[in-house]
Amino acid sequence: MIDKVPALESMFRFQWEEAQQAYVLLYPEGMVKLNGPAGEILSLVDGQKSTKQIIEALNGKYPDAGGVDNDVLAFMEDAINQHWIQWVTP
């Protein structure tokens, strides 16, 4: 999974929602309000960066966190199971 490239599933739109003060995933039937870490991760999902590159970017942004590797991998697994993202070939 670390070398795979995630992309948002086409039925979802990722955006900052001012009224919610959070990132959200919009889809035809509704909205998913994301917590802070999920929003940070999905903000880097662009169909070009690998999971490894996303982890490196977040570790660079939050060096005092002690490593986000396992958190990102767990999120990616959950996002795949929720059908929020898919694996693509860039």
Image (cartoon, rainbow, N blue to C red):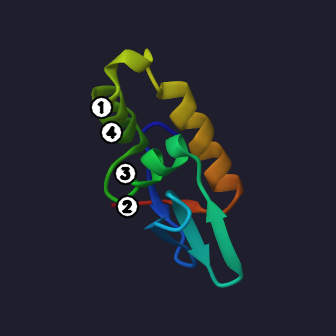
Circle nearer the N terminus (4, 3)? 3
Q: Which residue is mark 2?
A: 47
Of discs 1 and 3, which sits in the foreground? Answer: 1
Residue at 54 percent across and 70 percent down: it is 9
- Tell me which numbered mark, 2 or 4, is placed earlier along the sequence: 2
**Can you give x and y, in whole percent of width and height, for residue 10 in the image?**
52, 77
Is 60 placed left or right of 18 in the picture?
Answer: left
Crowding around mark 1 (Cα neighbors within 10 Å: few <14, some 14 to 19, many 20+) is: few
Distance from label 1 to label 3 (Cα)?
12 Å
Mark 1 element type: helix
Above or below 57: residue 49: below
Give yes or no for contact between labels 2 and 4 (Cβ–Cβ under 8 Å): no
SS class, disc 2 = loop
Determine which residue is flagged by label 3: 44
Q: Amino acid at mark 1?
A: Lys
User: Which class describes the residues within 10 Å of circle 4: few (<14), some (14-19), or many (20+)?
Assistant: some
Q: Residue at x 56, y 63 (%)?
A: 20
33, 73: nearer the viewer = 33
Residue 22 position, x and y percent, is 51, 57
Q: Residue at x 30, y 36 (%)?
A: 57
